[in-house]
Image (spheres, grey):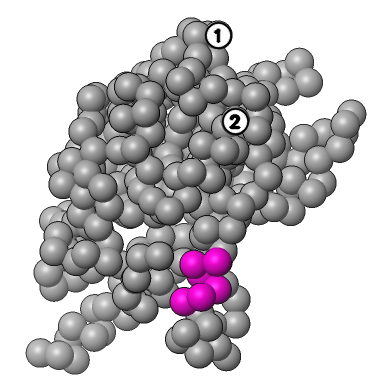
Amino acid sequence: MRKFTVTALCALALVVTGVQAQTVKDFMAAVMKKWTTPFEPFQLIGNIYYVGTDGISAYIIKSSQGLILLDTALPESTGMIKANIAKLGFKLGDIKIILNSHAHFDHTGGLAEIKKDTGAPLVAGERDKPLLEGGYYPGDEKNADLAFPPVKVDRAVKEGDVVTLGDTTLTAHAMPGHSPGCTSWEMTVKDSGQDRDVLFFCSGTVALNKLVGQPTYPGIVDDYRSTFAKAKAMKVDVLLGPHPEVYGMQEKRAQMKDGAPNPFVKPGELQTYVAGLEQDFDKQLAKQTAALEKAK
């Protein structure tokens, strides 16, 4: 198993509670266990299926002409994701398109392998293309702890671009900040005879990003601000995301029952979630600004 810096784990993993009471060793073990623990795949809503781990999301979208895979996880979980796809009765070779939400190691680790296995083209945000093809974290290109297998991007998308396979269309929404090319994907599904608008939200956490001084990339603060504003203005019925805790996946999965309303349908959840992200961003910005001033 690969090693990660404590800073990377603390910043990227919002999956462990009570960190202060744990030793660093215990914390690292808990995070890695969460991120690599299997989770039984299931039909989430309509033609969307969950095939990720207990701590990192990955999705299969079934269309009339094959499958779309959205994101992977850490490299060591690629076999698990392949097994989850098979458990649902799907064939790996039926993956015709691979989508990425953002170019961070915990969502890109299996892209190169699955792309090689399937021959499917990779579609990602325009500004994340150099990161994916270089296999690095922006602003920290030489940090091996944050590296991932480089993968060729076959199509780079920007705001409003669409990806269509058979009867299924996803619209790309550029939501930079978390990464320069962070891309949320929007689509419509049928649920109990009704159309439901689904958003695979890219991310909006500060994570390892430097916001001041020598920022992770130029314009990052304005990018976060624009993303928060854009997300709060969107009207969606179903919020999904790159980590299960973004939308309470495990709790909602446990509530699913035949004949009952789908618990993943929760209008307004996106706005509530983004409001919390924005508050945390303001705190992190103030903290980094204060630290920079103190260092002068």
Quadrant of the rendered image containing residue 37: bottom right
- 214 or 103: nearer the viewer: 103
- Locate residue 132, reporting x and y percent: 23, 43
Q: Residue at x 65, y 24 (%)?
A: 89
Pointer 1 or 2: first along the chain: 1
Question: Residue flagged by tag 1: what amino acid is it?
Answer: Ser
Magenta residues (range): 28-33
- Locate residue 154, reporting x and y percent: 23, 25
**Residue 136 painted magenta:** no
- Locate residue 174, reporting x and y percent: 32, 37
Q: Residue at x 25, y 57 (%)?
A: 147
Q: Main secondary structure of the magenta part?
A: helix
Do residues under tags 1 and 2 come within 8 Å of each other at their CB atoms?
no
269 versus 7 height, above or below: above
- 283 or 162: nearer the viewer: 162
**SS label for mark 2:** helix
- 190 or 147: nearer the viewer: 147
Tag 2 residue: 86
**Quadrant location of the C terminus?**
bottom left
185 versus 166 height, above or below: below
Q: Is residue 243 visible?
A: no
Tag 1 residue: 64
**SS label for mark 1:** loop
**Quadrant location of the N terminus?**
bottom left
Q: Characterize the local packing of mark 1: few (<14), some (14-19) or many (20 or more) Cα atoms within 10 angstroms.
A: few
Is 138 on the left-hand or right-hand side of 209?
Answer: left
Quadrant of the rendered image containing residue 286: bottom left
> Mark 1 to mark 2: distance in Å?
18 Å
- 218 or 38: nearer the viewer: 38
Q: Residue at x 52, y 41 (%)?
A: 81
Question: Residue flagged by tag 2: what amino acid is it?
Answer: Ala
Q: Is residue 146 visible?
A: yes
